[in-house]
Amino acid sequence: MNSHIYQAPREWTRLHPVSPFLGGWAILGLVLAYWIHQYLPDWVDGGDEGFEFFDRFPLLGIIAAATLAFAITIAISYWQWRRTEFRIGDDAVYLRQGIVTTQQRQARLDRLQAVDVVQPLLARIFGFAAITIQVAGGQKSGVELKFLRLGDAEALRNEILALAAGLKAGDDAPVAPDADVTPASSPGLIGHPLERPRTAVAAAEEREVYSLPAGRLIGSILLSGPALVLLATPVVALVAVFGFDYDVWAAVAAVVGTSVVAIVGALAGLLGFFWTRLNGGFGFTAGISADGLRLRHGLTETRKQTVPPGRVAAIRLHQPWLWRQKDWWRITINVAGYGEDNESVSVLHPVATREEALRAVWLVLPDLGDPDPAGTLGRAMSGQGDEGGFTTSPPAARRLDPLQWRFRGVRATDRALLIRRGRWERELFVVPHERTQSLGLTQGPLRRSLGLANVVVHSTQGPVSPVAAHLSVDDAVALLDAQAQRAREGRRRQSPEQWMSAVGLEKESAHG
């Protein structure tokens, strides 16, 4: 056991000196990508300009240029590291940085949305981690610290969550001899896998709720649209060759000769989808603690997310057509700070069974405000028409939406608004009333002529965009007025303590 106790710094402190070597590769990668973009098209088209590059610069010169570029990259990264400092206070985490001019940023703890401890592959090998503090106010309002020893990152996360919960400097805080199951780094460069970090502030006790088996994750990837396209491509090629006597190889050669960059880009995007789903869902586990929701996942890049209670602004349950037989669901959430283009970190469950899906919704919304929450959500996930008390689209919507107008519906419980849609690909949106930021009613010329309207529920930026579409104008206006009132009432009564008692943690800690 490592006797060193990790503690979050109260004075201005630099990141770990290894940071320039772990983070400097991005600049070198941009230079390499620019060079490939400039010369690769000439090689593909058979031009001589790309090959003349090697005539003008022999191999030794290329190696020397690459070495110089790497040295410059590391020098810039080192200079940036020297000009970057951070510290933690009772009210915020502060970061100041800048090479030419110094900028100071702060992440206010009273606006804390999530705290992530991230380990990219290289940092994971050597026992380091980055910590990201997300706060309300936009995608770039948080603070990211790259890189710290894993134990230091854990200590900083624990103290941030404790301060956000109301603990101030000087209050009693137990030392956590086994604060986490993740190995910590030793004072040297490479971490010892048998050691565990001891932090000045103990991590809250956690209770695991569900985990994702690797077999189900792989099966979900194979039952995805891109996988279907990939498997169908050789079948289509064989049909073209033997059924229509089509020269497929000539067509492929013509396409490749025209633009190999486009082909490589398409293949990279296709394979990137598979890798993102595999890497993001591998080892996925979810748990609850007094700090809030805990998520762990990652194959090469591991991520530990902690979302304090009540910070989830919207939930989306999505069931692709190929998942219908298995009754699997992908669940994503909106959390302020993550943003629209960061769906990989906004996943509540990559591939959930129906039971796990209901449990996942309970994690972030323990009180649905309904006497039969499981039944209500079950009907919302796979029902149609006005079953379960849903307000549906009128028959006039058939002209605009002939395939799924019967499957659209909206219903409000005492605590959340439920919006469903989809005939083959099902979707359910759950928006806590207190997290409704604003509402909008929209009508295009076609909807206006049919007496229809959409009600848009504005949430924080993220992958979830709730819209109750193709309602009658009277139903849309009534929903708009009623939801605005429910949102005001929800904000008055919402508090983190209600979340803790709802999931049973307050009772457990009292008996502990």
Image (cartoon, helix red, strand yellow):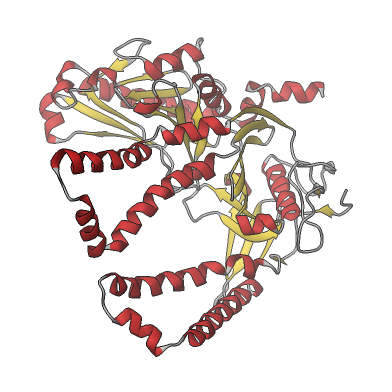
Task: Please report the residue visible at 15 percent of the width from the left and 29 percent of the height from the top.
Answer: 447
* Image location (x, y in percent) of residue 391: 30, 16
Task: Please report the residue visible at 66 percent of the width from the left and 74 percent of the height from the top.
Answer: 82
In this orientation, which residue lies closer to the viewer: 430 or 359?
359
Quarter assignment of residue 188: bottom right
Q: Residue furthest left?
A: 449
* Image location (x, y in percent) of residue 344: 49, 44
Left or right: residue 69 compared with residue 411:
right
* Image location (x, y in percent) of residue 417: 41, 24
In the image, is residue 410 above or below residue 23?
above
Residue 282 in sight from this viewpoint: yes
Quarter assignment of residue 263: bottom left
* Image location (x, y in percent) of residue 368: 51, 20
Task: Please report the residue visible at 39 percent of the width from the left and 35 percent of the height from the top.
Answer: 224
In this orientation, which residue lies closer to the viewer: 220 or 305?
220
Residue 435 in sight from this viewpoint: no
Left or right: residue 231 compared with residue 221:
left
Q: Residue furthest bottom?
A: 56
In this orientation, which residue lies closer to the viewer: 424 or 313?
424
Quarter assignment of residue 493: top right
Left or right: residue 225 compared with residue 506:
left
